[in-house]
Image: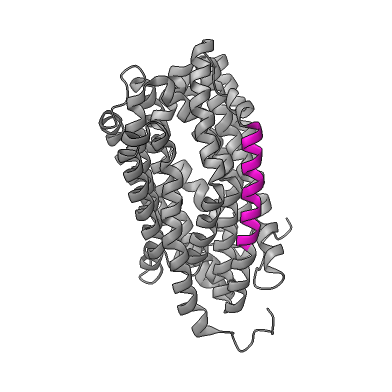
Amino acid sequence: MANRTQSMTQGSPARLIFTFALPLMMGNVFQQLYTVVDTMVVGKFLGVDALAALGAADWLNWMMLGIIQGFTQGFAILMAQEFGAGNYSRLRDVIGNSAILSALFSLLLLALGQGAARPLLVLLQTPGDILPNALLYLRIMFLGAPIVMAYNLLACILRSLGDGRTPLEAMVVASVTNIVLDLIFVMGFHWGIGGAAAATLIAQMVSGLFCLYHVGKLEILRLQRSNLRLQAREAPQLLALGSPMAFQNCIIAIGGMIVQFVVNRFGVLFIAGFTATNKLYGILEIAATSYGYAMITYVGQNLGGRRYRRIRQGMRAALAIALGTSVVIAAAMLLFGRTFLSCFISGTPQEVEQTMSVAYFYLAVMSVCLPVLYILHVARSAIQGMGNTALPMLSGVAEFIMRTSTVLYLPAVVGEVGIFLAEPAAWLGADLILVTSYLFVAHRTLRENARDPDEPPGQ
């Protein structure tokens, strides 16, 4: 197998960031495809109530996923730095410690998720007619925490080494698997919303096994027994990087649950419309998360390789690319949003009309504000790539404050519009923290290390 790892310490920053992000975008397209297909199958074949149940479970499910991704992305920062420095011996120690920590956390999250699912749905005042389906969906998804953790860790290992192609291929395989199983489980076996959840988990397992196969092919990652034990140096450093990112995602999810709490008061049709747009949120964010992954790898490798000037160059290039992309995606959503949303909505003509009205208005608000979200991802990831996950965590707190204060108080003044403004307000609050934080970290980390003596001029 050809070596797919890539050093990002030499060459054009704009080209490296874009070409690294491009397969990640395509992978995210396929990941969103099977998320969208889940929603389409549930909404079209199980009805508005089932779609609303899926929406009621969304933020709780996202919280579990966000905690898992926070830990694994934090672990990947140290991997990228060691790879950029060419320290492959320590890289293997970092990966071995990451695997052990991931296994322990996944079992803990599984237990906590099963115990907390019903109380949290009740606390959020989930309507009684959709509570059973929402609970069933969550129980199945939480049962798969070890599967989701394994896939995310393996994908992060590959991305930290500059391999964006293998995670793309894994998502293609997972997407096809999920779509086929959705049709079999929901439409064929009539397993309902539980069938959609089971299809998603099996697809994640297939993608994880695919990544594991490719990780095993890399000579520099051949782990020994000595690498697979918690070490006094690596484990605390990994926890220091991963814990703030997991906490940041948890805080964001709690804010989202408070939004869901308010949304649940507006009835099933409003919940269904809100859910339909939230399922397109992943498509809105698809390139932003890809640029974020690219920046963590790019900045981490260049920091490890002591290519400090290139970090500034990469930041400027990434912001320009990200802002241009956000404008294109926003325009597409404003033009074709109703067509996309119609794939999720079924019912009587009156139900469809009311649900579509809610969904498209919410989509339009988020689309107009999309550049704010793209700045958020680039700035947050650049700071994280420099090994600072505490300041980005504060941006998560800012998101929480802005999101919850907007959704709790603004609807009393402007009605439903106040709910739709909660997400853009959260993005803006995070940007205020992140832009200031980047300037601070860049000054401290980059200005004090203007250029490594061995770095060629202009690199």
In-image side of 375 versus 396 (left or right): right
Residue 426, percent from left and from top: 41, 49
Q: Main secondary structure of the magenta part?
A: helix
Looking at the rendered structure, the number of numbered marks drawn on it comes to 0
Q: Residue furthest right?
A: 2
Q: Is residue 335 magenta?
A: yes
Examine the image and state in which quarter residue 432 appears: bottom left
- Which quadrant is home to the C terminus? bottom right
Residue 295, percent from left and from top: 57, 62
Q: Nearer the viewer, residue 393 or 402?
A: 402
Q: Residue at x 37, y 20 (%)?
A: 130
Q: Nearer the viewer, residue 242 or 329?
A: 329
Q: Nearer the viewer, residue 295 or 398?
A: 398
Residue 408, percent from left and from top: 30, 39
Colour logic:
one colour
Q: Residue furthest bottom?
A: 453
Q: Residue at x 49, y 15 (%)?
A: 351
Residue 157, percent from left and from top: 55, 57
Q: In the rendered image, is residue 201 in sight?
A: no
Q: Residue at x 64, y 26 (%)?
A: 339
Q: Which residues are magenta?
A: 318-336
Q: Relative to 339, does residue 444 appear above or below in the rendering?
A: below
Q: Relative to 245, does residue 302 appear above or below in the rendering?
A: below
Q: Residue at x 59, y 23 (%)?
A: 342
Q: Relative to 341, does residue 307 appear above or below in the rendering?
A: below
